[in-house]
Image (cartoon, rainbow, N blue to C red):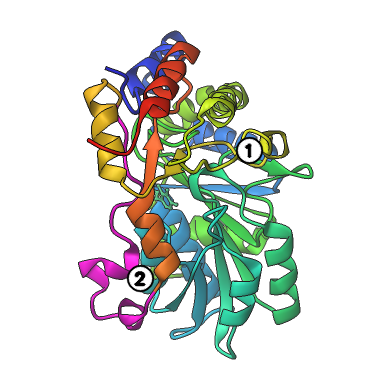
Amino acid sequence: MIPFLDLKTINSKYRSELMEAAARVIDSGWYIRGLEVEKFERSFAAYCGTSNCVGVASGLDALVLTLRAWKLMGKLKDGDEVIVPANTYIATILAITENRLVPVLVEPDEETFNLCPNKVESAISARTRAIIAVHLYGRLAPMQEIASLAKINNLLVLEDSAQAHGAYLDGTRAGNWGHASGFSFYPGKNLGALGDGGGITTNDSELAATLRALGNYGSQEKYKNKYEGMNSRLDELQAAFLSVKLQHLDVENKHRQKIAELYSRRILNSMIKLPVSGADFDKELTSHTFHLYVIRTERRSALQEELHNAGVSTMVHYPIPPYSQQAFRTKLFASKKFPISTRIHREVLSLPISPALSKEDAEYVIEIVNQYRGQS
Ligand SMILES: *Cc1c(COP(=O)(O)O)cnc(C)c1O
């Protein structure tokens, strides 16, 4: 069986470094808000090219707290509109609704699965105050265009970089395109902890200070509470693990890109649409970190079953679009039509890809996919 994602194998590779990091934290006697978090925040900010990184408890919290900080800073208020792709993971939209802001869902570009600048521009209204760009599946959204639209219209840009640690274009990394960027360090992400974790990168020091306070009961000074904050902190143990894993991120991303290149050059089946064609692959060398390798096919369940029968695990990201989720049934956007996103949700299938997937395994997946004839 070829697993979809083998976290045990991924992390076993660094077992001695991780054990050493764990021992260091255990022996320090200091588990929250200490030197390990400081060190990881400093190195991840440097990696992204930003002046600040603030560790929090999860990727969702990174997004929720950033919007909340902007409200406290007077940059957003209840009822403001936030543009967001219709085909994202639900967390992106939860961050907006949680803050009593109004998500305005826009259809993605059908080729890249990411925001399309023209459609973003058409969605801007007098009440729009922010855009959340999601680097879906690890591919950078068109940030130059989005940044210039935001500048002209005086909008905030928040990146949802939960799937794109390390992606870069023209020397600028995911995390350094927007006014702020939310990251998840969930175990399965490209930079994954051994538990939950998240972080925000930004060049805005006032935002960073507000976020730090918000995640710590709204307190900047012990027992003095400036805001109605919450408890959302990256802990010392996860930060120590992340410092280990960060050192290997570029090599792991390169491995993902090699696997993706094999898939893109060798999958030849007219029933299957690739995320990047073999011919275009070189253009994507840095801006796509292939958190997921997502193909499209009209009869997805038949292909999924055929792969399963051949011992290959696949997944669907995501089976139900956010506007069809029960949680959002009373929202205005739940009654709108999103034909492109709906089609994408019906046709996408994620093939195995990870730092632990071997070239031989990828070649086997390619063989099965190439044999698929659309019936089963
Ligand atoms: C994983 C993910 C999140 C949420 O991160 P958690 O750490 O699981 O809270 C948000 N947005 C996207 C696009 C994600 O993939």
Disc 2/disc 1 C-alpha distance (Å)? 29 Å
The answer to which image quadrant residue 303 occupies is: top left
Residue for badge 1: 42
Residue type pointed to by label 2: Glu
Residue for badge 2: 98
Residue 376 locus on image (x, y percent): 22, 35
The answer to which image quadrant residue 154 occupies is: bottom right
* Sooner in the amino-acid sequence: mark 2 or mark 1: 1
Q: Assess mark 2: CB under 8 A from ligand 1? A: no
- Whether residue 289 is visible, yes or no, is yes
Residue 32 locus on image (x, y percent): 40, 38
Residue 375 vs 20, above or below: the answer is below
- Residues shaded magenta: 313-337
Category of crowding for the residue at label 1, using alpha-carbon neighbours closer than 10 angstroms: few (below 14), some (14–19), many (at least 20): some
Residue at 45% x, 26% y is 354
Helix, strand or loop for disc 2: helix
The answer to which image quadrant residue 21 occupies is: top left
Residue at the far bottom in the pictured view: 126
Check residue 307 in the rendering and tell me which mark sits there, or answer none.
none
Residue 304 vs 27, above or below: the answer is below
Residue at 47% x, 27% y is 240
Residue at 39% x, 28% y is 369
Q: Does the magenta stretch include residue 328?
A: yes
- Whether residue 218 is visible, yes or no, is no
Of residues 22 and 82, which is closer to you in this image? 82
Residue 88 locus on image (x, y percent): 43, 58
Residue 81 locus on image (x, y percent): 50, 81
Magenta segment, principal secondary structure? loop
Quarter the N terminus occupies:
top left
Q: Does the magenta stretch include residue 48?
A: no
Residue type pointed to by label 1: Arg
Helix, strand or loop for disc 1: helix
